[in-house]
Image (tube, rainbow, N blue to C red):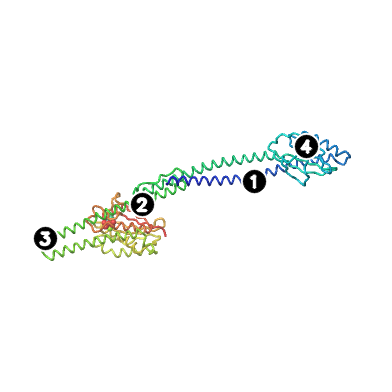
Amino acid sequence: MRHRHTRGTAFRLAALVAVIITLVNSVIFSALYYSLSAQLTAHLRAHIDEVRKTLVDVVGNEKDGFQELSTMIDSHARVAKSDEDIYLLTDETGKYIAGNVASLKPFEGWRAIPWKDLNLLGDWSPHRASDAVIGRWTPIKGGHLFVGDGNGDIRDAQRLQLNGLLWGIALSVICAICGGWFLGIRAQRRIGQMEEVLNAVAGGALDRRVPRGTASDDIDHVAALINAALDRLQRLFENLRQLSVDIAHDLRTPISRMRQRLERVRSGADSIEAYREAADASIAEIDNIAETFDALMRISEIEAGARKNRFANVDLKILLTNIIDAVEAVAEERGHRLKPLRAAEGPSIVYGDRRLLNQLFVNLIENAIVHCQDPADISVEIASVNGAPAVRVRDTGPGIPADERERVFRRLYRLEKSRTTAGNGLGLSLVAAIVDLHGARVTLSDNEPGLIVEISFPSV
Ligand SMILES: Nc1ncnc2c1ncn2[C@@H]1O[C@H](COP(=O)(O)OP(=O)(O)O)[C@@H](O)[C@H]1O
Ligand SMILES: [Mg+2]
């Protein structure tokens, strides 16, 4: 089915090119044909005019001029056969005097008379290409003179041109068909490859890619775009699969914990107090699970870009100062030192969603507070990178090893040593989603010791 369609398209392309070439060829050749024919006809007439003039001059004003012309024409007529020259001299009444045709009706101006309409005298062999005689009558003293010449030369030239035209068309049509066919087949083959790959991907083979051609043409460009889209699709799909596994895994632990506790209470508890305690613990566990789901849904919502319409200009200086004021007490309670905001000269306005940006920086500062077990220095600064603002949150805690710095952005992912701290492993995922929504970039680096998180915004 697909192959028939493939050939059909290639053939249509080839046929179209052939038709266009034929048309263009025909127009050019017709123009040449008519201009050359006109030129040759004019040439022939000029030649005949010359002969007429010479012959008319012979008659002149002399008494026996007519007689002399008659003799001359007779001798001309005798050798004229090979030249296709036609002469006829008549007297005033139209009676034959001399020449190589017996009779010819008088007419005005130039005319082409077919050979078969001429009463040729003597024995004429078949004429070359010639099919008519071009000539005209001239009145002379004492009678009329007709001089004509065969159109063989003109016909020869025309036939030659016609041959050229036909060969030209035949050759270009063959070239067009071969070329068009070749190009069409090639293009269709590449499109066929894409079709096949896309079908395979639709069938579940997410790792298939369109082979790249050697020519960097339009089709290759499209192939590259398709491959890029497939790369992204595959990445998203794998993330999704990983996420389902992670969620299932993460929920199992609190659920089985809850179950064990409830079982224990049911078989061993002897007081209302013990039941109440178990119920409270279970409720806390369930709240935690619900929170995790809420956070997951928020991240998805942000990733879908649903909140872009709430964007406005946000001054990072004000935003960060407020956050630091709000969390300072918590930090101190844990023994950390949260320093006042440092802001470099330069822009501090970004275009974004104020509440999400607030959440982003709260998450980062909270991470520093929570994941630094020992008292640490925590600082926040606004720097100017290439004319755009960048926020750095630093701490002097344990930091994140270089090979984990990509993974901590995965949903539900937590470092092994953080398993016992409060949290659900979604803080940095939310940060990444918010950063993406704002067209910003997040990078983790080493504070030696500790962690530096840098959020660099695009220039407004
Ligand atoms: N400032 C930090 N210092 C050390 N480790 C950190 C810091 N911030 C994040 N991490 C590590 O990255 C992991 C993922 O962080 P996050 O997504 O916020 O999850 P959560 O804080 O709920 O554990 C944390 O579990 C922790 O191991
Ligand atoms: Mg966190």
For mark 2, give the secondary structure: helix
Distance, label 2 to label 4, CA atoms, is 94 Å
Is residue 84 shown to the viewer in this render? Answer: yes
Q: Earlier in the sequence, mark 2 or mark 4?
A: 4
The quadrant holding residue 455 is bottom left
- Type of amino acid at the residue the image marks with label 4: Asn
Mark closer to the chain start, 3 or 2 = 2
Q: Which mark is residue 31?
A: 1
Q: Find out whether the residues at labels 4 and 3 contact each other: C-beta distance under 8 Å.
A: no
The local secondary structure at tag 1 comes to helix
Q: Position of residue 420 (x, y in %)?
A: 22, 56
Q: Which x, y percent locates residue 298?
A: 31, 61
* Residue 268: assigned label: 3
Question: Looking at the picture, how far across and down is residue 228, in whole percent?
Answer: 39, 50
Residue 173 x/y as whole percent: 55, 42
| Nearer to us in this view, 10 or 391 | 10
Query: Would residue 242 appear left or right of 49 to someone viewing this image?
Result: left
Q: Amino acid at mark 2?
A: Leu
Q: Earlier in the sequence, mark 4 or mark 3?
A: 4
